[in-house]
Amino acid sequence: MARPITYDRNEVLDKVVNLFWLQGFSATSISQLVKATDMKPASLYAAFDSKEGIFHASVDHYGRRSVDMISHLLEDNVSPMAGLKAYFNGLRVMSEKPEDEESRRGCFLVNTLLEMGPINTSIRDQVFYYLDQIEAVFRTSLQRAKELDEVASDTDVIVQAKVIMNTIRGLRVLHRAGGSVETLDIIVAQLYHSMGVVAVKK
């Protein structure tokens, strides 16, 4: 009896996320996925059922990691606003490297929403599930910032979390299109002003 083929699912998903991220869903073929993962077509279909199944798994893989990364960044920093500023500083660093192909890929979730949102409700809903989770992380962080008097006392954390999310989406699209660091700085400064940023706890 033949031994079942074993593979590292996370390693495979890292590879397919990278390929979909670079090319999008429509431009990526099964043969390219086979080559990228070094798996036989039958094994790929057995693991993920279809090309769309592979893509759904990729969105889950990237989405979970994004939620975890942002949660740790905001929670492990010296204060909520310090964590938020660290996040936007990370976007700024990427904007300072317009020649860097990896940094110019944008956000996989945002890219997926732009490509697939209008034509595939299942993938669209899956992306929004993770975007909603990220928004909840920002909302919790803003509430903590409010309690620490880092933002204005009348800050509506529900509204501001939505503003942050839409600002991030816009900045990722802007960066992918070659937007300037100066434009990013202006947008982020206006975001802080709208939240009534008072201080950052050290």
Image: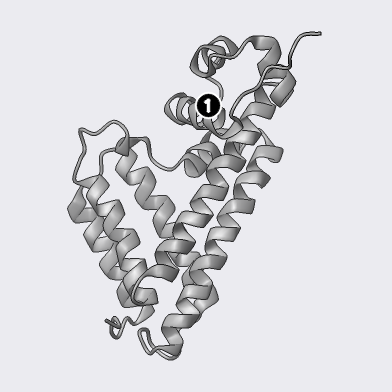
Identify the element where label 1 is drawn.
Answer: helix
Measuring 37% from the left and 84% from the top, which residue is drawn there?
151
Q: Quadrant of the N terminus?
A: top right
Q: Quadrant of the C terminus?
A: bottom left
Measuring 59% from the left and 59% from the top, which residue is drawn there?
133
Residue placed most toward the observer, 36 or 130: 36
Residue placed most toward the observer, 79 or 196: 79
Q: Position of residue 8 (x, y in %)?
A: 58, 29
Q: Would residue 99 be found to the left or right of residue 66 on screen?
A: left
Residue placed most toward the observer, 53 or 167: 53
Q: Position of residue 201 (x, y in %)?
A: 30, 83
Specify the color scheme: one colour
Residue designated by label 1: 16
Measuring 56% from the left and 13% from the top, which residue is drawn there?
34
Examine the image and state in which quarter residue 45 appears: top right
Given the image, on which type of amino acid does mark 1 rest? Val
Question: How many numbered tags mark residues here?
Answer: 1
Q: Would residue 94 be found to the left or right of residue 16 on screen?
A: left
Query: Relative to 34, does residue 56 appear above or below in the rendering?
Result: below
Residue placed most toward the observer, 92 or 42: 42
Query: Relative to 157, does residue 165 appear above or below in the rendering?
Result: above
Examine the image and state in which quarter residue 193 appears: bottom left
Task: Please tell me how crowded label 1 is: few (under 14), some (14-19), or many (20+) other residues with Cα within 10 Å.
Answer: many
Measuring 42% from the left and 27% from the top, which residue is drawn there?
22
Query: Relative to 111, does residue 145 appear above or below in the rendering?
Result: below
Q: Position of residue 50 (x, y in %)?
A: 71, 21
Q: Position of residue 84 (x, y in %)?
A: 36, 67
